[in-house]
Structures are given as C-alpha cells and as structure tokens.
Amino acid sequence: LAGARWGLSVDGLAALVVPAVASVALLVLAYAAAEIHRDRSRFHGLMLVFLAAVLLTATATTLPVLLLGWEIMGGMSYALIAYHWRRDDAVAAGGTAFLTTRAGDLGLYLAAGAGLAGGTLDLTGFAGLPPGWRDVAAGGVLAAGFGKAAQLPFSFWLSRAMLGPSPVSALLHSAAMVAMGGYLLVRLHPLLVATGWAVDVAAWGGAVTTLALGAVALAQTDLKQLLAASTSAQLGYVVLGAAVAPAGAVAHLIGHAATKALLFLAAGAWLTALGTRRLSALLGAGRRYPLVGGRVRGWRPGTGRGAAAGVVVHQGRGARRSPRAVPGVVPGRPGRRPARGPLRRPGARPGPAPGSARDRIRVRHRARRHPRGGRRAAGAAGAAGGRSGRARRPGAAAAVPGG
C-alpha cells in the first residue's frame, strides 16, 4: 500500500450519514456524562476515538483510509464493550465481538489484495476491476459488511455486546460500527451490481436475517437482548436495500440510527430506575416514573417486542390494563376496586369524609391523649385517606403525629 492515494470526501452519501452520526454521538455523550461516574476520562476518550474512526470510515474514498478507520473502529469497540474490565463476562463479551468481526474483516483485506492486483484502490474503481478480481473483491466486501452489520452467520456477537455500558450500546448499535457494515455495502453498490451474483447474496442475506432475528426479538424477555436482536433485524433491511434500493437503504439507516439510539438510552434509564432488564417489570413503570416513561397508557411487553422487531402493532385506547399497573385495583380481579371509606354501623351519624381536614385534626388530638389508641387511629385514617385519593404517596410510611 506504499504510495497509495489517501482520499477523504463528503459526497451526497456522506453528507447524509456524517450529520446523523454526529447528532447521535452528541446525544449519547450527553447522556453518558450523567451515567458514567468512574473513569470518565478513559470512557470519553475511547468514545471520541471510536467516533473519529466512524467518521473516517464514512468519508473515505480510498481503501487505505477505509482500512485505517475500520481497524480503529474494531479495536475501540472491544475496549468499550469490555469497559468494566474487572468483570470477566464483560471482557469475554468484548473478545467475542472483536474476534467475530475480525473474521469478517479479513474479507476487506482480500478485497484490498484484489484491488492491488487489478490496479486500483479507489472505492469508485472497484466495479471496473477484471472479472476474476472483481468477484474476489465483492466476496470480501460482503464478508466485511455482514460481519460488522451483525448479519447471519455473524449475528451472535451483538447479543454478547449487551454487557457493555448503555451509552456504548446506544452508539455502537445505532449510528456507529453496526451501521457502518450496511454503509459499506451501500457505498460499494456498483461493485455488487457489476458482479451480478453479489446483489443476490446481499439481498437474500439481509432478508433471511430480518426474518430470523425478528422472530428472535419477539421471543425475548430481556430488554437489552430484545434491542440487540432487533438491531440485526433492522440492519437486514439496510443490507437488503443496499442490494436493490440504495436510496431506501440510506433512509432506513438514518431513521434506525436515531430511533435505536433513543431506545437504548431509554433502556439505560429504565435499568437505572428499576434495576432489572425483564420486560414484565415494565408494566406500570411509566406511571411510577413519569419523567422517564411519560404518560404511557395501555402499554404491554408484546407491543414493544413487535415494534422493535419490525411488526406494526396498534393498540386501542380501550385496551385492558394490568391490575398491577393501576394503583388501587385488586390484583387478580380486574376492574374491581376496594370499597371507598370506612363502614358505619346502621343508624350511626355520618362523620367527616375520610382523609378530610376535620378527620386528621380529630385523630391528632386523640393521639395526644391516648398514644396507643391514637396510633391505631392514625393508621386507620392514613389507610382511609389513601383510598380517598388525598393520602400519602404509594409506598410511603404513615406519619404518626405526636407519637
């Protein structure tokens, strides 16, 4: 490669992808500033080098520059996935991702050898290579693209990469390394068309990955594993589009980058708030944490799995909600609420409304005169106030005035 031309250019394709990568990276780094508390300098340094390699890959016009960005991107992905290096499982996950993608990256070196033999290292000139070397280059490009984009048979590494921090997953799986696998196939679409057979391989590979990993995503009960399987499925659309409709592939690539980054950041927020990755634990979470979840009405885990896997799911406003998600609903008896207010003896004079100001003042005076009985009365008043809607927050202990 000595004496080869090093070229960078922002053409029409790069002009769409580079701002998308930069925007998603800014959002992820802002989130990481609030989530990462240990070794911040190391984390942000690795993220910035990783981002620079992605931008170098997106703007490369010659194979030496592409190989440089490609290699740095792979090395930084290992360091970021294994960021918690004291954990053996995180280090093993980083090694799995690195070695699997490296197996596909060998195809890019095969394409470089074919380019040297054919007399060109410009990406735009690969379609004009002699027929034999052109087929070799196309096969190498397909292997490299499939490996980075987590397409079958390389898709398993993406599941292991979920052990990295949430900001790493958000950038790695949205607009960075995984997206660059599809971007490479879009960039070298003329090479795939010139060979003829490479277009069919890319189209069928993307379609099979979309169907297979979409089914895997539907069967997941783990939030991050669902997002990992759906990433491979969605990149299958990009690979399919790179073969038959490059413009549609670019549009889906950019849309997926923004959507999947937000999904991973939201998943990280849920993990911090709930401490679990089980989808069943998200029932009613939007009501308990409105700042994170918003006013989500009628959400069910099946809806999220279907949407992430590419299935259009519509849920009406009248959908039945889980009893566990609605405060005051008796579990096991949907729609039945406990009786409101305390029971009175027949003929007794009606007292103040439960939880009213008069009721609370009366209980406070009784607690001062009779500590034991007043404590029981305070507890009963707190329970009645909880049923009336004026009580303490769910889960808060009842206050005992004067006791």
Image (cartoon, grey):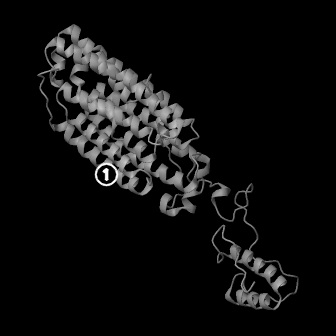
261 or 87, nearer to the observer? 87
Q: Quadrant of the C terminus?
A: bottom right
| Residue for point 36% across, 55% down | 30
Residue 306 percent across, percent down from the top left: 51, 40
Residue at the disc numbered 1:
26
Against 35, is 3 above or below?
Answer: above
For residue 162, say whether it is visible: yes
Residue 229 shows in this picture: no
At horizontal 26% and vertical 12% (from top left) the residue drawn is 135
| Residue 114: x %, y % from top left | 22, 13
The kind of residue on which mark 1 rests is Leu
> Residue 56: percent from the left, percent from the top?
23, 36
Mark 1 nearby-residue class (10 Å; few <14, some 14–19, many ≥20): few
Pinpoint residue 121: horizontal percent, then vertical percent. Answer: 16, 21
* Name of the residue lying farthest toward the right: 346
Q: Nearer the viewer, residue 297 or 191?
A: 191
Q: Judging from the image, what secondary structure is the residue with disc 1 in? A: helix
Left or right? Give the position of 326 relative to 65. Answer: right
Question: On the rendered structure, is 250 left or right of 265?
Answer: left
